[in-house]
Image: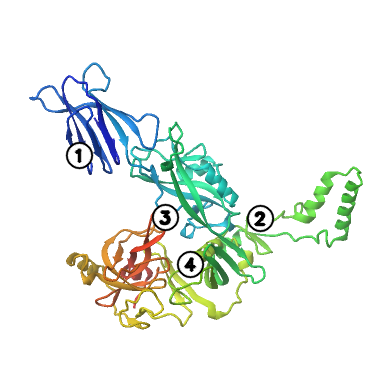
Amino acid sequence: MTIQLHGRWSLSVTKAIHSWENRFRIQGATTGSGTYPPTVGLAVVADGASWSLVAEYRESTADGWKPSEMMIDPGVERVDILATIGAEDPLPSRDFEDIQWEARYLGGTMLEIPYRPYAVRTTDLFQMPDGIFEAALGTYYMAVRVVNRWGLPFTENHVLDITPESRAILAARGIVVLDGWSNAELAALGQTQLGSGIVLGPLVPGAARTVYFKVNVSGAAPRKHEVEFVCWNMAGMQDVNNPNRRVRKHIFVSRTRIDQTTGEVVSEVQEGTLRFSLKQFAFDRETAYKGRRRLPKRPGGPGRDPAVREAIREALKSILDGREVDPCEVLHLLACHCTGNGRPGGPRDPDKPHDGRFEYDPFYAFPTRFSFSVTPRTPYTGQYGPIPYQDPWWKVLLLIIAAILLIAALLEQSSDLAYHDEDLVIGTLNRWSQNDIDAALCLLDTDRALGFSQVLDAQSDEDNQGFINALDGLVNVSGPVMTRAEIDDILLTTPPNDPRRRVFKSGATTGLTHGMIRTLAPDGHDKATWGIDQLIIDRDPAFGEDVSIPGDSGSVWVHTATLRPIALNHSGSRDANDNPTGDTAWASLLEDVFARMGITL
């Protein structure tokens, strides 16, 4: 029998009471592997993702070594585990003291939440764009990805919860954590609730799972909000307040509304405000018409109907005079003439979209032609507009608005928002694909866009001045796009720092920057599904520039030696606090983008 351990441990021999010859071995550790005598006081530090402790005995030197029976008693839980491990030879006394160790876990934190929690709609488990919580839609499941970084597996007693302190702060900011779950909800999400937390185990060290909390953000301000998570053992623990049980992450909230003066959709986040005017959208006509119900005509109302006004006045006067009044009659007057109850057709359902004449079951609608304006709180410094490659906050707001319109939540207001200056229209959406390439194809209605055969060279008003041809100039790109086979050949025949691996891109935020192709790997950002290899690009040591930071998505990587386009930039590296580092870029091969979008040049 072996004891499987994970991470960094100190093993100190505390007892060695045996009749036969004994030894122990550490196997599979990055450091500390070897064979050791059971000398009391001997201490060994072993480290590794997963390794094993094996105790052995033999009756004589002529016999081979045989495994001893082993046990581990971790005691009452603590983050820095202090366990007793024992080995027992096959003798009548089973005290597990033939060899005994004091095992102390030296790894520190219990868990990791590798990226910020994200919003999932409760109605259809649709993930909101970039995981942002939109206040207009109210309640969400908050998805939290958890990795076990501890020295032992999480059990069915380990839960992830939001600390009471964090719950109180969030509530004060208009974010309410909802602990009421139905069995159907828990089953749909594949999770179990224990107390107010969600069960993490069984989960071995190094493994991950996603758990969901339910939150209502309808009262939250459009900004980032910190959430403190904690891992507790509901069966008991010695160090409830150990900081290594806790992880803090931010969530982001947007707030979208209708400007009743202009008719625009206005969406706000911490970085700025976007105003959106819908000019054309596509919708599921059949579902919309089948699921509509004519709204009843409203009566004149107490303010316009003299008989109703007089009846209500008399009822109120009787109450003030102390006379007996049938409260049911007052309720009837208010219900019939103020809310519509009691009329044929009944009241309007506040949860369903309507256009003033009809109430609709939810149906799909998608904006295809629109205009918008952006007002950042900090002035935008991108190099090329009005359609820079990406400023994530405003691009995400457009997606959030699209998601709201998708369920027709703003049908009443969005049906006639077509009056803005045509010069502001970006274009018409043609095709898009989130899987594998995360790209969209649009017909641009602007004379500000460059053709595919040119990119902007370094500009004199930018930080990076490593131009290809000349400052403030253009770089002519040569076709066709570089193929996967040609990229494989470069990777196979050149060392990592070879000039033939050099590429450059002209990004909206960084300007023209240089990189070195590292490899092809099945990696992309965590908000999309990737079934094809992605090009990974690192900083070029000769320039030391950021290869990708927010604002650069959608820029085209070009092979420096041949000036052939190679890949579409979509992601950049981030640190443990989700801040961009600029060290690494991920990009989809243009060969794949063209194939999936049906593009030919």
Q: In the image shown, does 429 or 14 lie closer to the viewer?
A: 14
Label 1 and label 4: CA atoms lie apart by 52 Å
* Picture quadrant where residue 443 is located: bottom left
Query: SS for tag 1?
Result: loop
**In front of the other: label 4 or label 3?**
3
Residue 366 visible from this viewpoint:
yes
Q: Name the mark on residue 395.
A: 4
In the rendered image, the quadrant that contains the N terminus is: top left
Q: Amino acid at mark 1?
A: Ser
- Circles 1 and 4: CB distance less than 8 Å? no
**Mark found first going from the N terminus, 1 or 4:** 1
How busy is the neighbourhood of tag 3: few (under 14 within 10 Å), some, or many (20 plus)? few
Q: In the image shown, does 551 or 286 lie closer to the viewer?
A: 551
Label 2 and label 3: CA atoms lie apart by 40 Å
- Horizontal and vertical percent position of residue 62: 7, 25
- Horizontal and vertical percent position of residue 53: 24, 34
According to the image, label 2 marks what residue?
A: 350
- Circles 2 and 3: CB distance less than 8 Å? no
Q: In the image shown, does 437 or 554 lie closer to the viewer?
A: 554
In this picture, residue 442 sits left or right of residue 320: left
